[in-house]
Amino acid sequence: MGKCFVCGKHGLFLKVDDQRRCKECAEDAEKEEVAIFETYYANLLHYLRDLQILVEVGDDPIRALEYIPKFENKIEECETLRAEIHNPKHEERLMKKLINSITYQDDFSKRYGIGKLEELEISVIADSVTKKFSTEKIFLDL
Ligand SMILES: [Zn+2]
């Protein structure tokens, strides 16, 4: 007899998955995970956009001191983003989403694995030997 660990439903023919959830509970959990991921991804995108805004600098050496905190701030943002990209909770889903959204300018780019992540405004290049996009390589490009 199967028994769902989440809702408690049980029955002779009730099938549960490897986490002892019935089909409905597993689907609900999946929907929730997707929603959490979408929020995470939206935040990531927002953060990246913010980071891509350039710090304007002039030639006045005295005023240059004012820019230091701005750069320090960018470095800090960069570190946060780097950590978030490697969030183990989302890493796999993020990778799938990124690989699926790679676009190519033309046949040449496609053949040589020179792609673009439009949403992130980042170019990504496939491994020169395998012609595939690996997790490590995409994260490196990011
Ligand atoms: Zn259930």
Image (cartoon, helix red, strand yellow):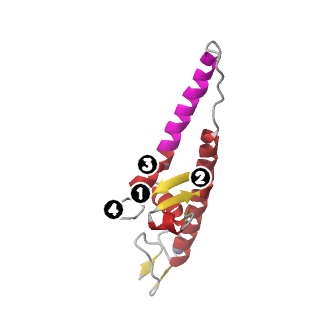
How much space separates mark 1 and mark 3, taking CA atoms? 8 Å
Helix, strand or loop at label 1? It is helix
Q: Is residue 90 visible?
A: no
The segment highlighted magenta reads 64-82
How much space separates mark 4 and mark 3, taking CA atoms? 17 Å
Q: Amino acid at mark 4?
A: Val
Q: Amino acid at mark 2?
A: Leu
Rendered view: 91 above or below 75: below
Front in this rendered view, residue 68 or 96: 68
The image's mark for residue 120 is: 2
In this image, 132 relative to 117: left or right? left
Task: Pick whichever of labels 1 and 3 is earlier in the sequence.
Answer: 1
Asked if the residue under mark 1 is in contact with the one under mark 4, i.e. CB atoms within 8 Å, the reply is no
Asked if the residue under mark 3 is in contact with the one under mark 4, i.e. CB atoms within 8 Å, the reply is no
Q: Amino acid at mark 3?
A: Leu
Task: Pick whichever of labels 4 and 1 is earlier in the sequence.
Answer: 4
Of labels 4 and 2, the one closer to you: 4
The spot of residue 89 in percent (x, y) is 47, 54
Q: Residues within 10 Å of mark 4 (few under 14, many from 20)?
A: few
Asked if the residue under mark 2 is in contact with the one under mark 4, i.e. CB atoms within 8 Å, the reply is no
